[in-house]
Amino acid sequence: MSTLDPFLQTRIAFIGGGNMARAMIGGLLDSGCPPSSFAVGESHPGQRSALAPLGVTVTDDNAAALRGARVAVLAVKPQDAAAALRPLRAQLGAGKPLLLSVAAGLRVTDLRAWCGPGVPVVRAMPNRPAFVRAGASALFATPEVTPDDRMLAAAILGAVGSVAWVASEAELDVVTALSGSGPAYFFLLAELLADAAVALGLEPAVANDLAIGTLHGAGVLAQESDGDLARLRAEVTSRGGTTEAALRAFDAAGLRSIVATAVAAAATRSRELAAHYGASGEPGSTP
């Protein structure tokens, strides 16, 4: 039995119907949820058209989408969240659905300020591989979230990849820097590997294909292992061999320090953006 089985008939409203919402709905449909379980509120006609092939209810009226829902998934851009939630305040307060926010960076205090007290909130930080059902999502729940609602939130995000819970909301800034931004780091490394191979004489198309294949294969190996990344690295590294030579060059160039600095910079930026788009701030130009 999948984790979604007890919730297959649960009514889920999506406030926002962009790429992440479509990915989540697609994953849930593939997991056995019927299209009738979903209603999507989306103001942009192009996004509504993109949702049509999924067979779910789509409307430009968020209140209509929310009606009767047990879960409200907030899937709008952070700068649009206040405008989306404030008109729904009375409806959210009356029904008290679980608010599952995948809007990057928005704090629980901000979400409560917009939707009112008593609404249980789970914040989730998914990443772009969710589009191909290979996401890595971290979740944080407020104390009033029931065990059943925690299971439901995990099942919804689990339809598009792996799920992990964090104990404090502050950890989501680190999650953003790790898995949220992380795909770009791996793409950059693959790009640089291909560029280096081309500089050493390999045909560009061959180098690109090999870099992509290696990126994919390493990910599959890691996913299907026991999760010991250091052991996996050691198994590829023969004493006195080519991999060892490359890893020593990485160490000499300070790769560990570079990565630590980069992840810290991303976490800091996550905190800055949360403050910028929070209930106490006014959306505007990015600081």
Image: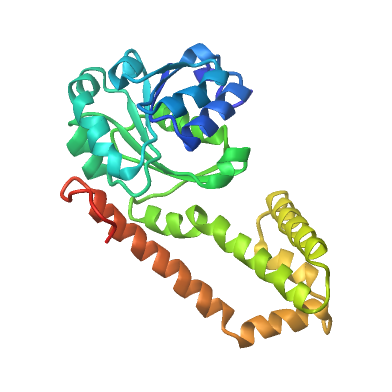
In this figure, which colouring scheme has been used for the structure? rainbow
Q: On the image, which quarter does residue 264 sit in?
A: bottom left
Residue furthest to the bottom in view is 252
Whether 225 is drawn above or below 103: the answer is below
Q: Residue at x 52, y 19 (%)?
A: 52
**Image coordinates for residue 214, horizontal then vertical, percent:** 76, 59
Relative to 201, 112 lies left or right: left
39 or 261, nearer to the observer = 39
Q: Residue at x 20, y 23 (%)?
A: 93
Q: Residue at x 77, y 73 (%)?
A: 198
**Image coordinates for residue 47, horizontal then vertical, percent:** 45, 29
Q: Residue at x 23, y 37 (%)?
A: 82
Whether 197 is drawn above or below 100: the answer is below
Whether 69 is drawn above or below 100: the answer is above
Q: In this orientation, does residue 136 appear?
A: yes
**Image coordinates for residue 280, horizontal then vertical, percent:** 15, 49
